[in-house]
Image (spheres, rainbow, N blue to C red):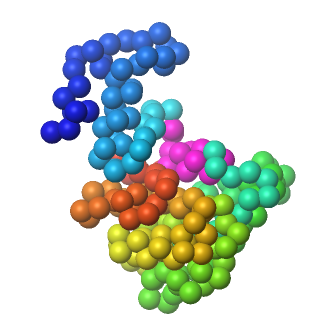
Amino acid sequence: ASDVYKRQSEQCFYGSSGYGYGDMGRETLDKVYAQAFGTEDALVRHNFVSGTHALSTALWGVLRSGDTMVSVTGAPYDTLEEVIGIAGTKGSGSLIDYGVKYKQVDLMSDGKPDLDKIALEISDAKVAYIQRSRGYSLRPALSIDDIKDICRTVKNINPNAVIMVDNCYGEFVDVKEPTEVGACLLYTSPSPRD
């Protein structure tokens, strides 16, 4: 067992000031998730009320005016379309309203990533966005090998791109997680998606 598991104790469940400073339980939980997903750090909070909320927070945290987001697995979940600004009311405060550019690379007819088209569209991207699950479409979920191929393609063209994966429903279904094959930022949900 790792050190982080050995440090769990009754103290992790003590109350805190309410400001979150020195909250041993929260800090330990973050470390447990980081270890489980092979990441440098993790942010586990009950304040995220839905998957869309968590994904939006990550996108707003990384993207700035003038940056480009490329969804390399086709259209994202419909709930993210308004956050990005590809659907909904113009001027509602979407990423596009704030100057973020959006591009999309559709999957091939067999549901696999189109690596050639990704290579053509990714050179100016700040974020390469991957949706692992099939969502409401009939395509198969992406495998770890699919994600690895996307990450390799993106990093070969644009080594500074942030590769973000919506990994909902993909947790612990393989020996590795997306962050172990090149993804930089990972959303995961312990419960069914909103």
What x and y, as percent, mark residue 86? 72, 65
Q: Quadrant of residue 121?
A: bottom right
At a point 79% along the width and 58% down the height, the residue shown is: 66
Q: Is residue 151 above or below residue 94?
A: below
117 horizontally vs 147: left or right:
right
Direction from residue 104 to residue 146 in the image, left or right:
left
Residue situated furthest left in the rendering: 1
**In front here: 94 or 145?**
145
Residue 34 is covered by the magenta coloring = no
User: What residue lies at 78% left-to-right and 48% top-to-bottom?
Assistant: 93
Q: In this picture, is 39 found above or below 140?
A: above
Residue sitting farthest toward the right: 91
Numbered range of the magenta stretch: 48-60
Task: Please state if 52 lies on the left or on the right of 34 as rendered.
Answer: right
Residue drawn at x 35%, y 35% is 31
Residue 77 % position (x, y): 55, 63
